Amino acid sequence: MDSRTALVEDLMERFPHVPREAVFKEDLLRGGVAFDPSALSDNEDGEVKPKSYFIFSFDHGTLPELGEAALRRPPEEIILTGGPYDLRRTVVSVRVNPASPYRVAANEDGVLGLYLDGKRIADVGVPPMPEYYRHKLSNGKSVMEVAPTIQWGYLIYLTAFRVCQYFGAKEECQYCDINHNWRQHKAAGRPYTGVKDVDEVLEALEIIDKYDTAKISTAYTLTGGAITSKVQGLDEADFYGRYAKAIEEHFPGRWIGKVVAQALPKPDVQRFKDYGVQIYHPNFEVWDEYLFKMYCPGKERYVGRDEWHKRILDSTEVFGARNVIPNFVAGVEMAEPFGFKTVDEAIESTTEGLRFFMSHGITPRFTTWCPEPTTPLGKTNPDGAPLEYHIRLLQAYRQTMEDYGLSSPPGYGPPGAGNAVFSVSSFMDSLPEDAPVEV
């Protein structure tokens, strides 16, 4: 293709059952977007909710490489509407790439738009600064640092442990920059709390609850790095579970409680449930057996792929299949040097994994891979996976759900193009908007 526009339009024509909004969204997520200075925020002193870097960098450059975007943060997310493709409301997580063919800039009237190959293709909306971000904790910390919200305010993201104990080249997942993201924020002098205090989390939630009068925040996610030994004397289930216990005691029924953790033995999973967690995300990352070993060496070493999958199935006896929602990182299947060479092979492999889990009533979800440059796979695959892979995955995902009679997973807000708020992939945008949403 001579241009990115031609590539996108070709895929929209070839895959008409995939919403056109999802085609643009996946391209922005996989390849990032550039920001004109006119589109940057004034950080926490402005009128726009700035990017919080809630767990990973999700950028195509390190902070020093982002230019002014490192000093004046871009918005947390953007909303696309209208334009020549008549886009329905589409929420997209911001992944900064100064070299992207997509650019957000203001026109002569100060109205933001998304430009591709120099042509305006959509109007751009940015999230307003929420009132709860304007209030500090008693110790001076910001709510954005302790309990940022994403997905247009739907989800409170509580990264309780900002580093991972899978450490170094022989243990770190090869696509993950959680440890580097911690280091770069500390090096830049930004506040970036390593282990969040339970009382700080509760105080931040009190502020959110007080000022979120419209009850836009509906769920919280507890997550962070894997714990292979202990943190503050606690194993993984007790470390993350204690936050859920405190939240549920102080705010019973206010939010849907979710936890992203390793695939743990059934007694540990039961402790999550006992602490008040409602949804469990034991992420399987990549389906193929060889790629799991190569790209998730720590998980292979400490648990192993087969045991990981067994534990996912066992956890359904605790949470119920609908409330076990493992994530995979869509696109690493095609990452060099070990990934599949063709889109056909990659889709066949990933669909095999989808069928395995969905045949047990489990509905996985996925995050579109962002090839962060400090990761091994980001260094060798700066362009990520082909856009065609991501579009065909959306098609295969929906078809597999229909084959097994499943609907959109709980805790993700409304499905359907124009309705979805899940911002780090288009799987919710691509599902039928009338699909029932269980909470």
Image (spheres, helix red, strand yellow):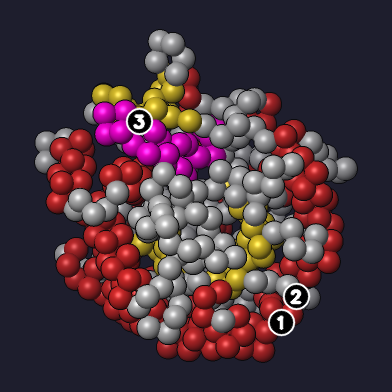
- Kind of residue at disc 1: Arg
For label 1, count other residues whose C-alpha is less than 10 Å away and answer few (under 14), some (14-19) or many (20+). Answer: some
Classify 173 as above or below 391.
Answer: below
The earlier-in-sequence mark between 1 and 3 is 3
Residue 252, x across and y down, in percent: 79, 64
Quarter of the image where one finds residue 229: bottom right
Q: Which residue lies furthest to the top in this view?
A: 108
**Mark 2 — residue?**
275
Residue at 44% in and 72% down: 363
Q: Which of the numbered marks, if any, corresponds to residue 76?
A: none
Residue 32, x across and y down, in percent: 37, 41
The earlier-in-sequence mark between 2 and 3 is 3
Residue 198 visible within the image: no
Quarter of the image where one finds residue 415: bottom left
> How far apart are labels 2 and 1 at the CA level?
6 Å
Residue at 47% in and 60% down: 176
Residue 122 visible within the image: yes
Label 2 with label 1: CB-CB less than 8 Å:
yes
Position of 124 with respect to 22 (left or right) is right
**Mark 3 — residue?**
82
Classify 237 as above or below 26.
Answer: below
Q: Give the range drawn in magenta.
A: 71-97
Nearer to the camera, 259 or 404: 404
Classify 66 as above or below 439.
Answer: above
Element carrying mark 1: helix
Looking at the rendered image, the quarter that the C terminus falls into is bottom right
Residue at 55% in and 66% down: 438
Q: Reply yes or no: does residue 72 show up in magenta.
A: yes
Looking at the rendered image, the quarter that the N terminus falls into is top left
Q: Which of the numbered marks, if any, corresponds to residue 271?
A: 1
For label 3, count other residues whose C-alpha is less than 10 Å away and answer few (under 14), some (14-19) or many (20+). Answer: few
Q: Which residue lies furthest to the front in this view?
A: 434
